[in-house]
Image (cartoon, rainbow, N blue to C red):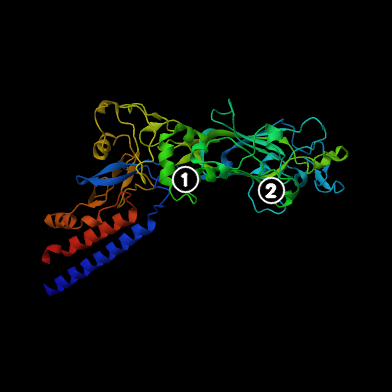
Amino acid sequence: MRHQKKGATMYLLLGFVLQALWVSWCHATQHYPASWGHYDVCKSQVYAEDRLAWHYMACQPEATDMTKYLTVSLDPPNITCGDPPEMYCALENPYMCNNECDADTEELAHPPELMFDSEGRNPTTFWQSTSWKKYPKPLQVNITLSWNKTIELTDDIVLTFESGRPEQLVLEKSLDYGHTWQPYQFYASDCLDAFTMEPKAVHQLTPSTMLEIICTEAYSTGYVWKYDKTVRFEIKDRFALLAGPRLHNMASLYGQLDTTKNLRDFFTLTDLRIRLLRPATGATMVDENNLSRYFYAISDIKVQGRCKCNLHANSCVFDKGKLGCECEHNTTGPDCARCKRHYQGRAWSMGSYLPIPKGTANICIPNNLGTSVRPNASSLGAANRNQARVCDNVLLRCQNGGVCHHHQRCQCPAGFGGILCEKAQCQGDSCEDLQSSQPSLRPPPTAQTLPLALLSLISSLLATRGLTSL
Ligand SMILES: [Ca+2]
């Protein structure tokens, strides 16, 4: 008897150690950025009335480098240098004309894709236009970046020039796949002369004027171009007008995004267009004897953003050359902008960032629930079980050797039950006693395989040793 008691105490201690390990593991894997909210999961599983049910949250895909998913087109289409081959002079020295562009020689060609290749190559790779040989006819190029999907900007757009920065440039956006365009920002060495606009800088904007379209002279300075190559569209400075200097109060920004369509639309687009209107000349007069000095060359374009999924998806896939949200919350469409068939029990609405940090999912509810029924996690969990994903090979793995069938149910091996086969089916009262005495070991909302395996291990060990002998 004494031996048995010692053994049981040992296993109990083991249980406590494993529990402590598990708790610290959970803390280590949780990442709740204090200011940015927690929108990386759309739903999680919770125990409600002693069974698993869904808990839904607002969610959005992670921000990423969006240049990997665009197509680029130039207008006029034959504006890239090298066909026929051409020699270029340096802007600051008209007698240094030893740069050749030849479209048929890989090392000397400058096609548009070199604006989006990986950085860190030396020498820099860049797209380059033909030179201004038709002066005084303007040298103008439109560079259009298309995603064929609505995206949301999350960081500054940065263009890096290999040539001098243009004296006149307009950045434009489209929200309707290139049918209509709106200016984002004007750039000129002289705003009044180029666009009859007073020059302005983003730091002069206020929360009430943050969507103003401005002309800036900050990115068009002439001769220091060797050191200052970038042209920027300042997204973060605009965010900061609502969220504070280091974006410490994202709740304020998210609250505004929730309620102000103009603000949401401002950062949303399907296409970007860079209109290069006048190249760098470095002087007031154009040197007509050396027109090979004047051209555009861009080495890099940065666009950070995410797919717009209306807070109904936390991932976006690039399939057959097209981006699409992986919609949750019974929504569908490339932007999750409508309710699925049979889930139109109330009008579709986008998810909400509020309350911070997890927001509100605003899921589409089944038709037969009617508009008067207020959905809650457990009733919807039961109603949607046929549609929602019960198991998969990522977060919702069937435990203890169970096999997931069509994402709808786990086929459990003998001795195990529960939705994810997480429960050891014990014989007699001892098992029930054990389960009710260990509430803190129940899986957290995002049940993972390790804690469930530990739980099963402890359960079966203690059950075999006979806890009642304590
Ligand atoms: Ca490049």
The label number, if any, that marks residue 125 in the structure image: none
Residue 162 versus residue 344 in the image, above or below: below
The answer to the question of whether label 1 and label 2 lie on touching residues, with beta carbons closer than 8 A, is no
Estimate the spatial distance between the alpha carbons at disc 1 and disc 2, rounded to whole Å: 29 Å
Q: Between tags 1 and 2, which lies in front? A: 2
Residue at coordinates 22% horizontally, 52% vertically from top-left? 415
- Up the image or down, 65 lies above or below 319; here it is below
Is the distance from the Cβ of mark 2 to the nearest ligand 1 atom less than 8 Å?
A: no
Within-10-Å neighbours for mark 1: few <14, some 14–19, many 20+: some
**Going by the image, does 111 lie left or right of 208?**
right
Q: Residue furthest bottom?
A: 2
- Which quadrant of the view contains residue 374? top left
Q: Nearer the viewer, residue 15 or 460?
A: 15
Quarter occupied by residue 333: top left
Badge number at residue 229: 2
Task: Please name whichever residue, 81 or 266, is drawn nearer the observer in this view of the structure.
Answer: 266
Q: Quadrant of the C terminus?
A: bottom left
Residue 405 visible at all: yes
Amino acid on which disc 2 is placed: Lys
Name the mark on residue 62.
1
Residue 65 seen by the camera: no
Residue 213 as seen in the image, left or right of residue 45: right
